[in-house]
Image (tube, grey):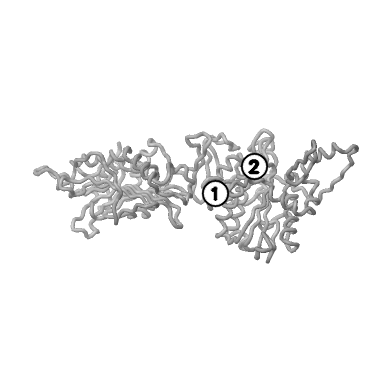
Amino acid sequence: MAVASAGQGEDRFVSDDLTGLGPRGFERLCQALAAYVFGPGIEAFGSGPDGGREASFHGRVPYPSSADPWNGFGILQAKFKERVVGTGADTTWLRRQVKAELEAWADPGKARVSQGRRPDYLIVATNVPLSGVPGSGGKARIDKLIGEYSAQIGLRDWRVWDAGQITALLNAYPDVRRAFAALITPSEVLAQMRDRLDTPPEVSVVLNIPTAAIRPGQSGCEAPFAAAYNAAGGEAQLGQALGEVYDAGPGWVQHFAGNLSGEPAVICALHGRAAMAVAESVWDEVCAIGGGHPGSGAAGAGFPVGSRPQVPFIGPASEEVELAGGQWGPGRLARCQRPDRWIWKPNIAFDSQTTSDRDSWGTGKGEMDLRVRLAARIPVADSDLRVTGAGRERMLAALRSAPFNDVLLTAARRRGLKAGALEWAETPDPGGHNNTRFATYQTVIRTPDQRPALIGNLWLMLPGGYSNGLSSVADMRFDFDAIQASSPPGAPPAQGDIRLTREELIGFFAQAWDVTTAILPMAATASLLDVPPAGAPRLELHIQNERPDTSGKPRTLSTFDLVDLSYYGRPRTTHHPDLSVGITVPLGLPREQITPLVHEALARMTEDFGFTGASPA
């Protein structure tokens, strides 16, 4: 609170109006304050490329205090917002700006790093006021963001000068206030002063601050940005540019004020791709993907490149926004069940790279004959997930009522095994791990002489260390020797009858899909859809012979004596101990979409392993 005005016998204080400075004026104000705070030895930079800084210092400076001074290379970066609305949108805007700068400082390929040096200390100065609520306010959010990049950049310390802090500095250094008084004094105070003067004097203020000639597509992007600007409606829709184009990870970005009745907008373009115009609220949703963790946002999920319905200006009413160019692969921003909420979904894609979870959690391999497995790897940005007692109860309640149990029971009964309701229990040591990071469960269906004939295994592993992947596995394992041995005396051999059918495979994979992506994670969170993503979920589907002819076991088996895959034609070779396929998928798919994907996955799996093809219907 800096400017006092008398009224009705009391003093009233009004905050400085920093928006009147404009972007260049604000930079100069910050440079002037830096000269007083750090000393006259600072180096100030003018307009044009500045390597990500408005001012810098070298050596010891009396900040944040003389008793505990900074000593090294420090920079000041100014972030000016044209229109400050006093809501969370201001903080979101600032967070996006700061994140782009941090990404640039963290990238060793950027010229500011390769041709310069990374800072030891950082000051972010902004005209945006930030809430001081501990832990959740704007100041805490920006501070946490910088902290996430500090080790990668090598920052020793940092500070954020928001509008309130800058006002406090102007109070401490009145010479700077006087130099900029004509620009930062609120208009209501000027009006009151003028009203109190009997003959208001003529005041002529000459501002030596050049006005930037801003147009869509500066920095060498004129043609694609101008095309997008005009296609979206030009100034009538987007308004004036708020600044120049800046490099933001996989592409270029420029912000626009919007028209009088519309919201602010953004034009963005991947390097080498056409530019797209989007509403700022949509751009903010893209930047918020991943919860602001390093490598998330537009860098991870990508830039908008289209929408459904396809329009030249992607507004908040769009049903889906197509994204590309991110580190996580192509995907889209889509509406979820709540119309006011968006979620990121990767595009569905099949692959044959299926070694990561083929033998993970392979306890007891070789003790049975056949293992059918669905394994999920789900990258998440939340490192605070924990398996709790309440979470286990929530997960088990959902598991007991899941159709997955019917798949196991039906498979057992078709092979003559007597099975009632399944009982899921924690997997004992040494195969089981059960703590705040692991949850492992099993159910066993036995023959009359108590030999395990069918085993269901479930494993959940939360991210740990440098891994951000949640791992979730569901197995169905058979001992055909135990099943045949339990047949009544004199009964015909059951080998041909007990092979796993195509329909049973489809049923298992469809139900295990739900178990691994929705039910098992309940041990740590009510829904993975509420956890910030850190990449694209991926599933592996495996059909594994645990006793192939290369295993050296006393009793070896052919995979095609265990699984009936004749629907997919003839195998060109008989040696197939492990058939598998991978699939990248979004979370939360409905059942009517999962089952057709399982059909396609099995067709691709058999095709990849040399089958002649499914017989015509």
Disc 1 from disc 2: Cα separation: 31 Å
User: Is residue 272 visible to us here?
Assistant: no
Secondary structure beneath label 2: helix
Q: Nearer the viewer, residue 438 or 484?
A: 438
Evaluate if marks 1 and 2 touch, with contact meaning CB atoms under 8 Å apart.
no
Q: Is residue 274 visible?
A: yes
- Relative vertical location of residue 274 with respect to residue 113 in this rendering, above or below: above
Decide if residue 96 is on the left or right side of residue 27. Answer: left
Q: Examine the image and state in which quarter residue 241 appears.
A: top right
**Image location (x, y in percent) of residue 237:** 66, 36
Sequence order check, earlier mark of 1 and 2: 2
The label shown at residue 292 is 1
Nearer to me, 611 or 259: 259
* Between 226 and 501, the one nearer to me in the picture: 501
As drawn, the residue found furthest toward the left would be 490
Q: Which residue is mark 2?
A: 227
Residue 54 vs 80, above or below: the answer is below
Instruction: Name the residue: 34% across, 40% down.
Output: 397
Q: Amino acid at mark 1?
A: Gly
Q: In which quadrant will I find the C terminus? A: top left
Report whether 277 appears left or right of 455.
right
Toward which corner of the image does residue 613 lie, by quadrant?
Answer: top left
Discs 1/2, front? 1
| Amino acid type at image mark 2 | Ala
Q: Secondary structure at mark 1?
A: loop
